[in-house]
Amino acid sequence: MHEFSIMSQLVEKVIEEARKRDAKRVLEIELDVGQLSFLNPEQMRFAYNVLSKGTILENSRLIINIMDAHVRCEVCGFDGKPDYVDDASYHVSTPLFLCPVCGSPVEVLEGKGCIIKRVRLEL
Amino acid sequence: MREHPALPDEIEVIVPDKGEVFDIELEEDLLEANRKIAEENKQLLEKHRIRAIDVMGSVGSGKTTLIERLIGLLKDKYRIAVFGGDVTTTIDAERLKRSGAKTLQINTGKECHLDANLVRKALSKIDLNDIDVLFIENVGNLICPAEFPLGTDSRVVVISVTEGPYTPLKHPYIFMEADVAVINKIDLAGTMDVDVNELEAKIKKVSPDIVVVRTSCKTGEGIEKVAKVLGLL
């Protein structure tokens, strides 16, 4: 739902970086989106296409990598992916924030970000 | 307009020829900007010894009524202010004003959630030395507010039995981010054929550390308990 505001921040940031380097065009942007973020890639693409029109980002390629979540258990030391509950009636799998090994609450280390990894510019 | 950080030092900049294709690595987290402002809000609130509570939940779950009830209970003990977040109207802010708290409306325009920057602006418009407790009523929505911390001490999510038994499993993230879950309208549980124990178990399943309180903002049941778990009584 808030893909638009996130993508307008992205477009603004990339234009700023491109200007610093006197770039003619932006060819490609690579984003790492955490699995636990609430961003829907399809809506991100839609917003990106709308927002990039008429800017040096127009017609550039947007690559979205969905990054796995990473959790850690302070009790037993488990370090890895969280468990998911797959229930057909909910259509999506729900992450469980309980340790897959010992059942204690886990700390989320990764999976909530939306990171601009790389920008390809034509100078 | 926030200041963007300078490029990290470790990036080696090679001066390219015109027309050349050039990759830059940024590692900039777009959600981090909000988190940073939230942290600044938190420090500002702490400096003025203000307890701030973010109240989230669906449209119609009872957020405004819960805040009204809490104001009624606590207004002799604390100086209370409320920020009402809404897309366009001031209906809730008008209601809250009548309950006796200082009220400031934050209209998000088109956005589906409050963000830390809007709260920062609102904080600059009130006298922080004149407040002990601040309730921030978020926009009625179970998805986006979870991703945008505002810098409050506590985050409360209000759900009601009239939303049916599946809310926690459909929207687990907001429960993960919240410290307290309020199950409201328990007076209607029988009518709605919703098992409150089961609903509480579902909340605990997606968010093991959360404190669950059952209320009826209509009858007043459970309101004192909400104030207690928030450390206000």
Image (cartoon, coloured by chain):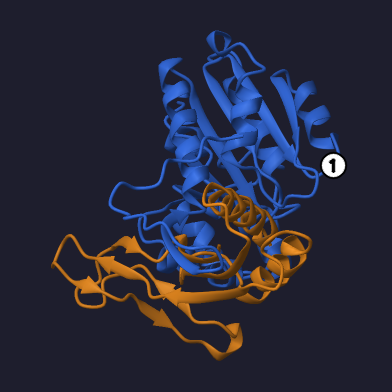
Chain colours: A orange, B blue
Q: Amino acid at mark 1?
A: Thr
Residue at 75% in and 53% down: B59
Q: Nearer the viewer, residue B38 or B60?
A: B38
Q: Is residue A35 at least partly visible in the picture?
A: yes
Looking at the image, residue B31 sits to the left or right of residue B209; the answer is: right
Q: Nearer the viewer, residue B82 or A34?
A: A34
Relative image position of residue A29 (x, y in whole percent):
54, 68
Residue at 51% in and 29% down: B52
Q: Nearer the viewer, residue B100 or B177?
A: B177
Relative image position of residue A19 (x, y in whole percent):
59, 49
- Quadrant hosting residue B168: bottom right
- Up the image or down, A111 lies above or below B101; here it is below
Residue at 34% in and 48% down: B8
Chain name for mark 1: B
Position of the N terminus of chain B, as image quadrant, is top right
Task: Please identify the residue farthest to the left as the structure is shown.
Answer: A76
Residue at 68% in and 61% down: A56
Position of the C terminus of chain B, as image quadrant, is top left
Residue that label 1 marks: B88
Callout 1 crowding tier (Cα within 10 Å): few <14, some 14–19, many ≥20: few
Q: Nearer the viewer, residue A100 or B222?
A: A100
Give the SS element for disc 1: loop
Q: Is residue B219 at least partly visible in the picture?
A: no
Looking at the image, residue A112 sits to the left or right of residue A27; the answer is: left
Relative image position of residue B25 (x, y in whole percent):
40, 61
- Up the image or down, A64 lies above or below B13; here it is below
Looking at the image, residue A69 sits to the left or right of residue B146; the answer is: left
